[in-house]
Every structure is written in structure tokens, then in C-alpha cells.
Amino acid sequence: MKRVLVPVDGNKAGDEAVALACDLVKRTKGQVFVIYIIQVSRALPLDAELIMENARGEEILDRAKRIGEERNCELDTRLLQAREAGPAIVDEAVERGVDLVMMALTYQKRFGEFDVGSTASYVLKNAPCRVWVCREAMA
């Protein structure tokens, strides 16, 4: 894999996905792109200035950069604002021409069953490249 996209949201599984992506591209001297998406309510303009969300996103991306530094892997990080995370991830994958999207999931149940959620489901259905799902362990 030469180009890997890792969307993060601040959970531990995302940190693990960043580390795994760094390790994966080392052999090929590839690139890791890490994105944090702020989902903007339809009640607001898409370019609304969301100070608290921006600060949280920057903090999460800084943490990803530190993980990259620990693994001698330079990351290209980007903070995005979008209405929905799934389409934003797919658009970013297309725009950057990535070989792989590495999704990180927390273990969550919905109606008593494990649920991947709408974002991962959208990416799995629509991404033009490979998609790896890294789910955290059950509690």
C-alpha cells in the first residue's frame, strides 16, 4: 500500500489504526493521510466557524502526528467540515487517490447486536478502493 487514508474521531481504535497505517506504508515509503471530520448541522452554513469542534479536531490530529513521529512516519493531516462523515471520507479517498481507507470502530451495540454504524457502512459500500475495518476489542 502506497497511500492510506485514516479517518479519526478521537477514540483509541483510531490511534491504533494510525499506528497500523504507519507500519503498513514503511516498506513502500508510502503516505498516510489522517482526517478529522466535523459534522456540521444542516441548521448552520457548511463553513460555520465551530471553535470548540475545531479545537477538539486539532487536538486529535496532533495526537495522530505524535503517533506518526514515534513510528518515523510523516502524516498529512487535515481537518474537514461536512454534513455527513461517510461521503466526506469517500470524497477524500477519491481526491487523494488512496489505495486503502482504514476505518477504526469502537465496539458498540444497537438493539442488542453489534453495529458498524452509518459512516463505516457508507464507506464500505461506496469507497473505490480497499477498506479495512479495525474494531476495538469488546469490553
Image (spheres, rainbow, N blue to C red):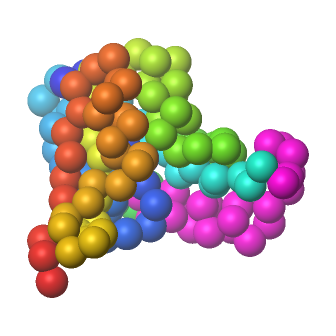
Q: Tell me: 98 left or right of 49.
A: left
What is the x, y in percent for residue 38? 63, 54
Q: Tell me: 20 left or right of 39.
A: left
Q: Is residue 13 above or below residue 21?
A: below
Q: Nearer the viewer, residue 70 or 21?
A: 21
Q: Tell me: 94 left or right of 4.
A: right
Question: Exactly how many numbered labels are in the figure?
Answer: 0
Residue 69 is at least partly visible in this image: no
Residues shaded magenta: 43-64
| Residue at 51% from the left image edge and 57% from the top image edge | 61
Q: Tell me: 37 left or right of 31.
A: right
Q: Is residue 123 above or below residue 139?
A: above
What is the x, y in percent for residue 50? 80, 61
| Residue at 53% from the left image edge and 51% from the top image edge | 36
| Residue that extends furthest to the bottom in the rendered view of this protein | 139
Q: Quick check: is 99 in the magenta stretch?
A: no
Q: Quadrant of residue 49?
A: bottom right
Q: Quick check: is 56 in the magenta stretch?
A: yes
